Image (tube, helix red, strand yellow):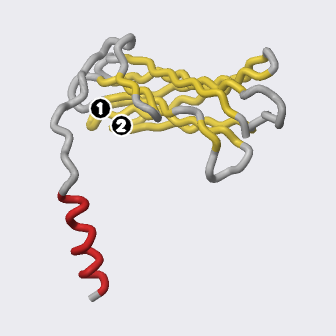
Amino acid sequence: MRRILFVLAILPLFLLQGTALADPPVTIDPEKVIPNKLSQRINFLGVCYGRSDFPHLSSHVPGTVNAQAYTYCPGKGVTVTSTLTRTYAGAESMITRSKKGVGRVSVNLSFKCLWKPGQPRIQYALRSTHKLSDGSTGQTERMEKLKC
């Protein structure tokens, strides 16, 4: 009985929310990307896209910085190649990962966070290249300065 009352109490909250009716712009030009607060996305024709998320502090492994990139296109071959770069005290460290598949692939990259109290934030940049089997290619990039 409590569950029914709970569902009836919150149901109006879901019904009062509007729905998005516009589709995002479609482009295969890597210079025209669709950014949002958490990720940068490039749209290919149809429902296909590539996305790079902001480098962020890990919630699963304390003391690490994670970044993730996806390429999505149902029924097509997809590839994502990403490089996470850490710039610290004038030196750059890089990790590169690549993955191929059909429909959807993702790569996860991480660095141990070197930041210490009193130091400036450390810059992390994720650069990704997204490729589809039809030859379409696009790039996404995200950068964040972090402290641990």
Q: Is residue 67 above or below residue 25?
A: below
- Amino acid marked by disc 1: Lys
User: Which residue is at 83% across, 32% downward?
Assistant: 118
Q: Residue at x 65, y 27 (%)?
A: 145
Q: Position of residue 28 (x, y in %)?
A: 30, 16
Q: Nearer the viewer, residue 45 or 123?
A: 123
108 or 10, nearer to the observer: 10
Work out whether residue 73 or residue 22 is closer to the camera in this orientation and state it.
22
Quarter of the image where the N terminus is located: bottom left
Q: How many marks?
A: 2
140 shown above or below 7: above
Report x, y in % for residue 34. Answer: 35, 23
Dot 2 alpha-carbon crowd within 10 angstroms: few under 14, some 14 to 19, many 20 or more = some
Q: Secondary structure at mark 1?
A: strand
Residue 130 picture quarter: top left
Horizontal side, residue 17 vs residue 28: left or right: left
Q: Amino acid at mark 2?
A: Val
Residue 55 numbered tag: none
Residue 82 image offset from top left, x and y in percent: 54, 26
* Identity of the residue drawn at 35% across and 14% down: 32
Q: Determine whether label 2 and label 1 are within 8 Å by CB.
A: yes
**Residue 76 has which mark?**
1
Earlier-in-chain disc, 2 versus 1: 1
Return the x and y of residue 35 as percentages of the image width and height.
Answer: 40, 25
Q: Look at mark 2 in the image and give the residue it sits on.
A: 102
CA gap, disc 2 to disc 1?
A: 6 Å
Point out the image quarter for the C terminus.
Answer: top right
Q: Which residue sits at x=31%, y=85%? A: 2
Q: In this image, 145 relative to 10: left or right? A: right
Dot 1 alpha-carbon crowd within 10 angstroms: few under 14, some 14 to 19, many 20 or more: some
Check disc 2 and report its element: helix, strand or loop: strand
